[in-house]
Image (cartoon, grey):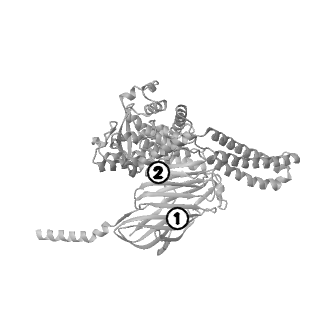
Amino acid sequence: MKKKITVFLLMFLVLLLWEYPVFAKSYFHPSINQTFVFQKNGDVAVTDVRYYSFSGSFSWAQLAFNVKGMDDIQFQGVWDEKDGSPLRTEMSGSSGVRTIKWYYTAQDETRGFRIQYLLKKPVVRYQDVAEFYWKTIEDEHASIQKLKVTLELPTVSPNLFKLFVHTRTNPGQMNFSPDFRTVDFMIQNVPQNSFVEARALIDPGIFPNLSLIPTKRYEAILEEERVGAGVQKESSGYRSPVNPLLGSILFFIFLGLGIFYFVLFFVFYFKYGKEPKIDYDRQYEQEPPRDIPPAALPAILSHKQVNRRDMGRAFMATLLDLARRGYLSVEEEEKKGFLGKKEYLVFHFTDKTDKTDETSSQKGLLPFENDIIHLLKLISPDGKMVSTLDIENWGKKIPRDQSNFLVFIEKWGKDIKKWWETNYFYTYDPDAQSKKSFYMGYGILYFIGGMFLFVFSMISNPFGQGGFRGLGALFFPLVIVFALIANRALGRWSKNGLLEYRRWMAFKHFITDYSLMKEAPTTLLQIWDRYLVYAVALGVAEKLLRNLRIYAQERNMDIATPGWYYSPYGAVFTLASLDSLSRLESISRNMENMANLTKALDSATHTGGGFSGGGGGGGGGGSSSAG
């Protein structure tokens, strides 16, 4: 009997060793970079650059697309991204699926492939919106460390350009170009078999060669996105004769005012279009340039109005700063669900918090910091603590036209900006801002007045049947283009504002570049949490914490234990705890995304976007594999 068992175990061991290389084969995507170029006829040309990190021997890879949501797909080929050489490919198709397979040789290495294809008519054009609803990443795929997707329109679309990204991962970063012709988003750590879906809402006039569906869909689409994002909405031909002489006069008035508008731009630009010269050339700052609340950074990093994206970060940084100063304590927890686990922070009120009231400014709190304390107490379910999940649930609600969080941070940002300007200085040049406001106002009045002049002249003036029509078709687009350029070119920093901005950017450079940080004195390990609150406000907390860990390990030193932070499950605070704290970056992005998403879900806005966990109904999808 023992002999049979021994033989069986030996056979099992041989079989296991024989199959081991198969089990050992695996791969993931270090990065995927996709570019979607839209055509006026509704087609979309796609360049998909995918990097594969292979463990084991591989010789082929393939992409299978569902035809859902488009007429068809035309594969153009696959190239090696390193040397540009074309690879042997096979195309196949069956009912509802199109597949491209390519061949190569790889062994324990990283390879990049550029796949190009044309999506036929994935854009749907309605009366009030053109919609591109597409799974940029298929349903079945290997894990992805970094995904970047760019959408490029055939022309600018300032009247309507929104993007909603559906993903089960943490929100990433989204950037619209100033002329609203392109938008890109970046997401990190996309799990295996977790799709990423983009839903772009575009001005239907951008696609004149695409057939029109005679119905309106814009409001219905926004409502679908609200539901997917978990946003709750709580409780709408007679012509009068005109004297031909008057029409001619109006025509020449329009012409003269237009020429003056364009000349005025160049006059203002040459006088106010260049940033002031300052005597500062330092590459880095080892200390925060000023000992100020982290919430003040958005006021420093902008000319005139604070950026909504920066305010989401400043909100989170202020919570941590209040904890560092003893008003709160922080504990990390996680919530497990069907889609995985979600990390969040719990803020416990301290005895110092309970003593805050309307006179708390005398106890060390500034008015806008006191606003945060009162808000947390308002949101708190029990008056003792509040979590980032509680804040998110409160922030998503829309009692009126805007979400709670958006209403709060917009007023909060204005209060902070006013505090900074009252106690320090203007970050923008008042003269340049005044000229910019004048020019933008002039452009708006000219455009509106020009439309009235156009109507009157078309009624009565012979110029209106040809000359004025052609002049209007030329001038109106130029007015928009010059206004977009002026909006960026005419406003400029004040000398003090530019100096302050560059000093904070130098500090940001210091805490993110380890080659600079390693020269800092070891006292950095005792005051690191002071640096952390600024790093959160600047959006670089992960990089700072990673550099701190390397710094401490190289010197074989311990890092100071923060009295305000409690490690998960009662663990002792060590260098490994910095890895847990690095999740602050993703929680900060959640705050930032909450403001951006709820703004875009408002039908009164024309541009913007964000990330949500909804979706799944877009076109495309399919699978990818390699072997």
- The x, y position of residue 279, in whole percent, is 53, 44
- Picture quarter containing residue 530? top left
Q: Say if residue 237 shows up in the picture.
A: no
Query: Which residue is most to the left?
Result: 2
Position in image of residue 593 (x %, y %):
49, 46
Q: Could you say which is closer to the camera, residue 283 or residue 241?
A: 283
For mark 2, what is the residue?
Answer: 172
Q: Residue furthest front?
A: 279
Examine the rendered structure and indicate whether residue 626 appears above or below residue 147: below
Mark 1 Cα-neighbour bin, 10 Å: few <14, some 14–19, many ≥20: some
Horizontal side, residue 468 vs residue 105: left or right: right
**Residue 422 at x, y percent in the picture:** 54, 31
Task: Check the picture and name the quadrant holding the C terminus.
Answer: bottom left
Q: Which mark is residue 211?
A: none
Q: CA distance from mark 1 to mark 2?
A: 21 Å
Please, what is the three-letter code of the amino acid marked with disc 2?
Answer: Gly
Q: Residue at x 82, y 49 (%)?
A: 251
Q: Amino acid at mark 1?
A: Thr
Secondary structure state at the residue bearing disc 1: strand
- Give the quarter of the image for residue 571: top left
Left or right: 236, with 309 as reference point: right
592 relative position to 110: left or right: right
Residue 220 visible in the snapshot = yes
Determine which residue is flagged by label 1: 47
